[in-house]
Image: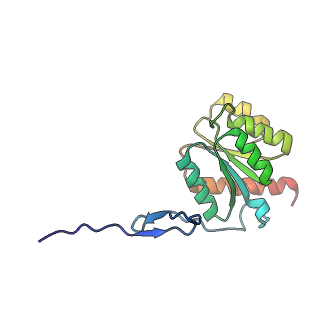
Amino acid sequence: MQQTKLKPRHAVLPFSPPGERRALPINRPYVLFARNDESGSKKATSERTRIVIAEDDYLVATQMEDALMQAGFQPAAVVASAEEAVKAAVDNRVALVVMDIRLAGKRDGVDAAIELFQKHGMRCIFATAHVDAAVRQRAEAAQPLGWLQKPYSMTSLIELVREALGRLDDESGE
């Protein structure tokens, strides 16, 4: 009797960009985030949910982008350098930047976060593997809304983004 090898079935993910078909095997579970406008940001407008992701690891950045989209946020840009992060955040007038500390290029995420805060009043969350006392002290000038130590789950990222947006709304008195 000849044994046939079955090919795994795949489901096309609903958040795949046009022209790009990303798929996950059907038999493998994956997390879907329910949109919850009641927690976190009180504003439901897209202006308040626009987020820049500054991460130089492509796979991590893609995971973050997908998780944020599934949770109802609008990733305005995914960038790999500090210079690109500042430009994307300012050009898109985002509510928040999720920033890695070690980025491609000469500057790091702390420099970009400080520039965004001091010149444009924009705040960030640091999602990084490089969290020591010296980095935290240097980053205080950017008044970060939170820290995620790598490796982290996408669930913890979404929770921290919602908390950060809620804090921004509370600080602005809305």
- Residue 103 drawn at (x, y percent): 63, 37
Q: Is residue 139 left or right of residue 101?
A: right
> Which residue shows up at 76% across the image and 57% down it?
166
**Quick check: 84 above or below 106?**
below
**How many numbered marks, from 0 up?**
0
Query: Which color scheme does this rendered protein use?
Result: rainbow
The residue furthest right is 173
> Which residue shows up at 63% across the image and 43% down it?
80
**Quick check: 78 above or below 138?**
below
- Residue 129 drawn at (x, y percent): 57, 38
Q: Residue 111: name its quadrant.
A: top right
**Towards the viewer: 85 or 148:** 85
The residue furthest front is 19
Q: Is residue 101 left or right of residue 29?
A: right
> Which residue shows up at 52% across the image and 67% down it?
13
**Quick check: 35 above or below 108?**
below
The residue furthest bottom is 1
**Quick check: 19 above or below 125?**
below
Q: Residue 174: name its quadrant.
A: bottom right
**Towards the viewer: 152 or 90:** 90
The residue furthest left is 1
Quadrant of the rendering where the N terminus is positioned: bottom left
- Residue 155 drawn at (x, y percent): 58, 57
- Residue 147 drawn at (x, y percent): 66, 43
